[in-house]
Amino acid sequence: MKAHKYQIKAYEGVMDWTHGMGQTQDRLYIPGQGVFAYRSKEQIDFFSDDKEVIAEAEQAIKGTLNIEGGAKYLGEIELPEDAILRVVSAGKSLSQAKTIFQESARTLVDLL
């Protein structure tokens, strides 16, 4: 399965951004599926199928993404379809679970 790899500068918070202490984040755009972001095997940042994140990925690939530190397109790569589909499926499940958790937590806080 074909995917597009690119890099951006990622910042943990405002202080990191203010002091220019970003880290390089690799992102993998999987057309029609979403974006997978990581900094290392130990630092998996996110999977998103949000339209805004996908649009940002498409801009990065075209070289038109205007962000602090820029984006560097690393090219199109071929990856095993089963590996991609497992990440996409798990990423979507994780996103759903996060949404359910946040809604449930808000309800609990309201009861307190």
Image (cartoon, rainbow, N blue to C red):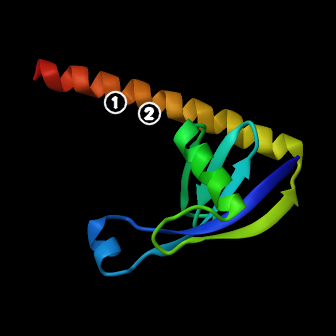
Looking at the image, the residue that sits furthest to the front is 64
Q: Is residue 14 left or right of residue 39?
A: left
Position above or below: 87 against 56: above
Mark 1, Cα crowd under 10 Å, few <14 / some 14-19 / many 20+, is: few
Task: From the viewer's side, name the closer residue of 41 and 77.
Answer: 77
Q: Quick one: SS at disc 1?
A: helix
**Residue position marked by numbered label 2 in the rendering:** 98
Q: What is the quadrant of the C terminus in the image?
A: top left
Q: Is residue 91 left or right of residue 96?
A: right
Residue 3, image x, y percentages: 80, 52
Query: Could you tell me how far apart the alpha carbons at marks 1 and 2 are, in whole angstroms?
Result: 6 Å
Q: Looking at the rendering, which quadrant does residue 70 occupy?
A: bottom right
The three-letter amino acid code for the residue at tag 1 is Gln
Going 45% across and 71% down the picture, which residue do you hit? 68
Contact between marks 1 and 2 (CB within 8 A): the answer is yes
Q: Nearer the viewer, residue 70 or 25?
A: 70
Q: Is residue 51 left or right of residue 13?
A: right
Counting from the top left corner in percent of width and height, residue 36 is at: 64, 51
Q: Residue 79, which numbered label?
A: none
Residue on which the image places disc 1: 102
- The residue lying at 21 percent from left, 22 percent from top is 108
Q: Is residue 52 above or below residue 21?
A: above
Q: Quadrant of residue 64?
A: bottom right
| Element type at mark 2 | helix
Q: Is residue 109 left or right of residue 84?
A: left
